[in-house]
Amino acid sequence: MTPSARLQAAIELLAEIHGGTAPADRTIAAYFRTRRYIGGKDRREVIDRVYAVLRRRAALDWWIMRGQGADAVPDVERGRMIAALTLIDGWSADRVAGAFDGGQYRPPVLAAAEKALAKALAGNGLAHPEQPLWVRLEFPEWLEADLTVAFGPRLDTEMSALLAEAPLDLRINTLKATRDAAMRALAAEGIEAVPTLLSPWALRVHSRPPLATLQSFRHGAYEVQDEGSQLVALLADARPGMRVVDFCAGAGGKTLALAAAMENKGQIVACDVLEGRIERAGVRLKRAGAHNVERRGLTSERDPWVKRHARRYDRVLIDAPCSGAGTWRRNPDARWKLGSGDVDELVALQRRILDSACRLVKPGGRLVYATCSLLSAENEAQVAWFLGEHPEFSAIPVAELWEEAVAARGGGACPAAGPYLSLTPAQHGTDGFFVAVLARRAEPEAGAETGTS
């Protein structure tokens, strides 16, 4: 592809991403699936251009409004690309015009308003002292109060970290490999990977290798999984022989981690209301050699199956549907698809899920509630609500769990002193995650004193 053709592909992709509801990574994958003639290097450059715009969309739009006005540049994605080329890449107006030359597979010639925009923006940087906080730090304006409460004086640091590219983390599948063996296998295939600081299962790769083509991946030695997500599964502390439910299993990432922790002994029920998604997890389960997993589609969070299996499970993991604010490094488009009403709906859904799934926990068992959100309304406030509604549960401080669940398996020191685990990219180098472990009170043994007469 010519450089201009790559620009046109990026503009087309941006239009598809902003015009649809699917996450950017899925839209991008679908785009290239129908264009297999595009080579790996060209694909990488197109994707890099797309993500540069997605990560700095608020600032680009602010400059467009300042330089020309949105109405004067009717094709919003072309306008954003022009702004990115001048403000991020430092292109001159003439160079922009030369790239938009109307040739085959290349962007159409600049309209008069687009030429004026390129001239107005050329020579500037992306930052400007007049930009409001939400523009400078790239988050929806309506979230400013919530994020300020969450981070206080760390707001700049935390939100700036979410603008960076996320690393590629792998979770070693201990059913088939050790971390050292996986590192050697990757090295033999030309991939450098290093252990992370917290999870005993994690390796970090500082590149974007085509993992699906590697023999070690096809063998099932590892899965792609952020270190923070691995810690969620670790803190469930699922042991061989236990009965475990992964209530919102999705594509099965944490299910696979639980199966490995349980050494394929015991039972895991992987549930999700998106039955097709949980069924597709079968390919990953087979590659990983996980044999103790039953996949179950649910009609809703209150599916009759839950009532029929009440109080039977040692561990119930709820990786709840959430705003996903902690994953904005990976999904920068998601921040602009989120509305304040969406958060209210998610909070209500999370409460319904908690209220239903907790019935599955047997006396003495544990409920693990996790989100990839940074918002207190989805995290601490939800746990406070739940404990108020269900006094038979109590929180286990993370520091108490960490020694057995993580450190004993070779993990690093516990990064949390409070009752819950809150991870952020700025502080821990992981995606943003929240984890609370809640224990159900054990029933008194038969014949034991109850304190009643």
Image (cartoon, helix red, strand yellow):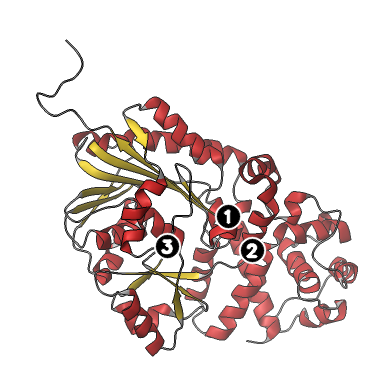
Count of marks, rendered view: 3
Label 3 or label 2, whichever comes before in sequence order:
2
Q: Which residue is mark 2?
A: 15
Residue type at the position of mark 1:
Ala
The answer to whether marks 3 and 2 mark residues whose Cβ atoms lie closer than 8 Å is no
Give me the disc on residue 412. Answer: 3
Residue 334: assigned label? 1
The quarter of the picture where the C terminus appears is: top left
Nearer mark to the viewer, of 2 and 1: 1
Amino acid type at image mark 3? Gly
Q: Position of residue 408 (x, y in %)?
A: 31, 60
Residue 88 vertical placement versus 150 (above, below) = below
The front one of 157 and 189 is 157
Sequence-wise, the earlier of marks 1 and 3 is 1
Q: In the displayed structure, does residue 433 sit left or right of residue 56?
A: left
Tell me the residue at 84%/60% (across/down).
Answer: 128
Residue at disc 3, secondary structure: loop
With 86 as the anchor, is 224 left or right in this view?
left
